[in-house]
Image (cartoon, rainbow, N blue to C red):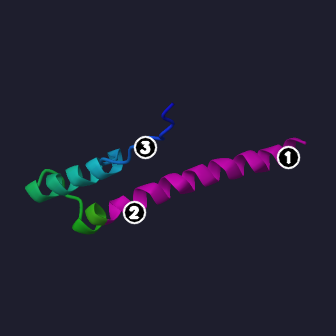
Amino acid sequence: MNNKAVTYSGGMGIGTLVWIALIILRATGCITMSWFWVFTSIIWVPLGILFVVFLIILVFIIVGKLCC
């Protein structure tokens, strides 16, 4: 019996595709975002999501301590 593990990596994620779309839209003048925000959005969006998740967890912890 052949028990080889097959793993696939790859492709571009949704974040990369959105980032490329932002670059194209900014280059063609369809959006007026600053180039700073276009190029750094790949960093800020995941950090923002992480921050929101952290806040939600913090609220659950605080509410749990107040109720019990």
What predominant SS class does the magenta segment belong to?
helix
Mark 1 or 3: the one toward you: 3
Amino acid type indicated by mark 1: Leu
Q: Position of residue 4 (x, y in %)?
A: 47, 40
Seen at 81% across and 44% down, the residue is: 64
Of the two numbered discs 1 and 3 on the same chain, state the one appearing first in sequence.
Answer: 3
Of the two numbered discs 3 and 2 on the same chain, state the one appearing first in sequence.
Answer: 3
- Outermost residue on the right side: it is 68
Left-right relation of 64 to 24: right
- Name the disc covering residue 66, or none: 1
Mark 2 or 1: the one toward you: 2
Q: Which residue, given by chain and number where applicable, does mark 2 sit on? A: 43
- Near mark 2 (Cα within 10 A), the count class, few <14, some 14-19 or many ≥20, is few
For label 1, the SS is helix
Of the two numbered discs 2 and 1 on the same chain, state the one appearing first in sequence.
Answer: 2
Q: Position of residue 51 (x, y in %)?
A: 55, 57
Amino acid type indicated by mark 2: Ile
Q: Which residue, given by chain and number where applicable, does mark 3 sit on? A: 7
- Name the disc covering residue 27, or none: none
Quadrant of the drawing holding the C terminus: top right
- Near mark 3 (Cα within 10 A), the count class, few <14, some 14-19 or many ≥20, is few
- Outermost residue on the front side: it is 1
The stretch of residues the image draws in magenta is 40-68
Mark 3 or 2: the one toward you: 3
For label 3, the SS is loop
Amino acid type indicated by mark 3: Thr
